[in-house]
Amino acid sequence: MENFKKFDIPPQLLEQLNEFSYGGFLLFTFDNEGSPRYYAQFDNELNMMALQKSSEYWLEGVHDLNSDTIKAQMCGEEPPPKGDRPDDSEHNDWDGDFGDEDDFSS
């Protein structure tokens, strides 16, 4: 990677992102040195708590998926298909419809 000055997302871009969100956003990214960075902006405490809870559900789901995959690999099995895991129905009331789920990998 080329050496660049430390990069920060321009404040104008963050302001536009906030304008197009409903109540705020939480953005995770890497800087030019590969260090994780986050940007957050919330219109009020209620939106902050709602986005925090949604983030927790997402992180739990990614953790469970990775855990199931690692367990299956250790046992020489295929990972269970989505919907066959016992905890898949635990958070059915939250469905992040982002439209590009098939393109996501972690």
Image (tube, rainbow, N blue to C red):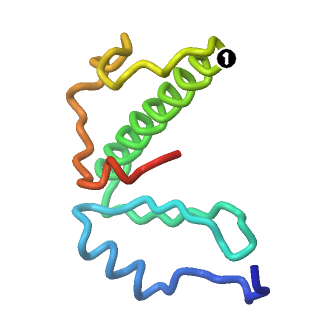
Q: Nearer the viewer, residue 29 or 83?
A: 83
Instruction: Give percent across and percent down for residue 64.
Output: 49, 25
Horizontal placement of 48 versus 5: left or right?
A: left
- Residue at 55% across / 15% down in the picture? 77
Instruction: Give percent across and percent down for residue 47.
Output: 30, 52
Instruction: Give percent across and percent down for residue 19.
Output: 26, 76
**Above-or-below relation of 42 to 82:** below
The residue that mark 1 highlights is 74
- Residue at 64% across / 83% down in the picture? 7
Q: Residues within 10 Å of mark 1 (few under 14, many from 20)?
A: few
Helix, strand or loop under label 1: helix
Q: Nearer the viewer, residue 28 or 106?
A: 106
**Above-or-below relation of 24 to 14:** above
Horizontal placement of 97 versus 74: left or right?
A: left
Quarter occupied by the N terminus:
bottom right
Q: Nearer the viewer, residue 79 or 37?
A: 79
Residue type, mark 1 in image: Met
Q: Nearer the viewer, residue 24 or 7?
A: 7
Instruction: Give percent across and percent down for residue 81.
Output: 36, 23
- Residue at 23% across / 54% down in the picture? 99
**Above-or-below relation of 20 to 89:** below
**Above-or-below relation of 5 to 52:** below
Residue lying farthest right?
3
- Residue at 33% across / 63% down in the picture? 24
Q: Quadrant of residue 13?
A: bottom left
Q: Quadrant of residue 61?
A: top left
